[in-house]
Image (tube, grey):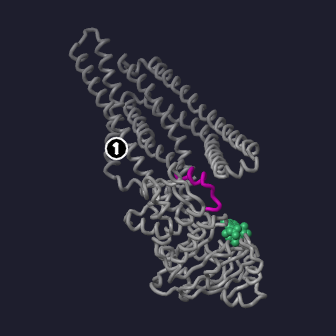
Amino acid sequence: MPKVKEITSLLQKYLSPYVKQVIFLAVILISYNALQVLFPQILRIYVEAVSAPSLDVKVLLYSSIIYIGMSVIFRALYILLQKISQELAWATTNNLRIDMTRHCINLDMTFHNRKKTGDMIERIDGDASTLSEFFSTFIHYFIGSFFLVLGILVAVFIEGWVYGLLFLAFIMIALTAFYFVRKIASPLWKKVRESTTALFGSIEESISGLEDIRGNGAEPFIMKRFHEVSQINFKDKNKAMIYSRIYYIINVLMGAMINLGILMISYYFAGYLTTSSGTLYMLLTYGTNLLRPLRLILWQLEQLQNSMANIDRVNEYFSLESKIVDKGTKAFPVEEVNLSFENVNFGYSEDAFVLKGVSFSIPHGRTLGLIGRTGSGKTTLARLLFRLYDPNEGAIKINGIDIRNFKLKELRANVSYITQEVELFKASIKDNVTFFNKNYSEKKVEAIVNEVGLGSWLEQLPKGLETEIYSEDCGLSAGEEQLLALSRAFLKNPKIVILDEASSRLDPATEQQIDLALEKLLLGRTGIIIAHRLSTLHKVDDILILSKGEILEYGPREELLRNPNSHFSRLLQKGAEEILI
Ligand SMILES: Nc1ncnc2c1ncn2[C@@H]1O[C@H](COP(=O)(O)OP(=O)(O)OP(=O)(O)O)[C@@H](O)[C@H]1O
Ligand SMILES: [Mg+2]
């Protein structure tokens, strides 16, 4: 359970920009509930006027007009209350959602590897929506109901202390009973939220692995697992709902009790309390009116429970810190960039290193060709340079400065990392190249797309750069995807280029295009190419062969070629088109 301090600090953070609206809401809320306390008073005047021996038409008329007038104002206040509380809730939770998304993007890869996308959606959307509902209804119903109950109590005490005590006792008994039922129900709701998250996670996992699932005929197993997860969720929900209903039953019973109490008191205390028929009518109305705010208070307590779990999880989420510390202050070199890895050890988990004692250097303008069997650690090495992870031991340096000393943003702005599997957005080609940055002109993007050799491809698209990717008009081959990724790198104009070549086979024409584009991109830049094709290796200056995370061979390409016993020479002699060492 979050502490009161945590809840108030969250509320303060997200409500403080809206102080004016909050004050306005409070004024309306108080007026709205004051009217609810006044209604039965007007009714009493009316009932007393009707039951008086001589009918006073003036009193009847005035009380009716006041009642109707108050009803109209009451309705108008209700609409206003709904509108303002909902607007406030949406504004605050949208800000919360934005903060959560930003936080999520900035967390390191260890977090992203561990968490399923479904979990994250449930957190950012599900938790934030529940909180939004909580914000809007809690102020409206819980605080409002609290004031209403207080108002009714004051009005009843004014009428007679015996009635006041009866109402007070009734509220105490009711709340105590509800408290105990709530104590049982609250862990049940937490369980419901957890099993719902598990259900979302399982759906997301199945959808993203659709091809693999179909390809391996795993549908029955996936469906079985889905049934299991949804069954747990259904059972949890059912149980929680049953316990929630007990709240309401108790509330209704309490309502009957108070009416009985009022009637009994007015009967037995008839001598002391000169209760008129109007007053009795008013008290019974107050008794009945007490049911609704108590029900709302209960409902809100239920909501509060859910929201507590939400707030807990939101706070837990915000307390996660990226392992990638961004405290560097050194300026990134503007001219020459000499890169070196010094005794780098790295493992995704503490106990097993994936890279072991890796040391090499790439002087400015040179390109290193990185090869090795699948799983040897090539992609991992690239990720370290981009600071998706930091080495456990050793250091990666640029011009002798550990890359942890540069601002992360600056480092990443100067390094282009073209990943093995290109990720494209369902958006226009232009947005895919510019990453939605509107500062780039159409002309510039077009020139770059031409430069990577996609000019003729672009020409035959009906809407040119505005064509949506993956739409009917625009399908892309793996090669074209990589070319598009290369154009992203051109636009960025980086100092260092890392290309993790696609392991899928490309047709010779596209290969040639990629080679040409790459040659242009690497000109005057420091580069690492993780090669899966021999032809790519003809362009690099140095060769590094990785084997199980260790350097098997490293040296200038020409030198390795001259030595017929080098692994590289033997590899070329074998003439394998794809590299298998
Ligand atoms: N996100 C990750 N979490 C945990 N282990 C990982 C992760 N990514 C890779 N590994 C492991 O690290 C090792 C090196 O993987 P890496 O992806 O660097 O290999 P690679 O040389 O790029 O292979 P490929 O040629 O298939 O692309 C492998 O044993 C792999 O299972
Ligand atoms: Mg790889």
Q: Quadrant of residue 360?
A: bottom right
Q: Residue 502: x percent and y percent?
A: 63, 67
Residue that label 1 marks? 25
**Residue that protrudes farthest toward the left in the picture:** 58
- Please tell me whether residue 5 is drawn above or below residue 561 in the rendered image: above
Q: Is residue 36 or residue 134 the one in the foreground? A: 134
Q: Residue at x 49, y 76 (%)?
A: 494
Taking the image as shown, residue 321 lies to the left or right of residue 490, namely right
Which residue is depicted at the point 73% across and 50% down?
215
Decide if residue 307 is on the left or right side of residue 532.
Answer: left
Residue 84 on image: x %, y % = 35, 42
Say which residue appears at 52% left-offset and 85% top-offset. 337
Residue 68 position (above or below residue 458):
above
Which amino acid does the dot numbered 1 rest on? Leu
Decide: few, some or many residues near mark 1? Use Cα within 10 Å; few <14, some 14-19, many ≥20. many
Query: What predominant SS class does the magenta segment belong to?
Result: helix
Q: Locate residue 176 relative to residue 235 in the image: left or right.
A: left
Q: Is residue 214 above or below residue 46?
A: below
Q: Quadrant of ligand 1?
A: bottom right
Q: Quadrant of residue 81?
A: top left
Q: Which residues are magenta?
A: 112-124
Front position in the image: 487 or 278:
487
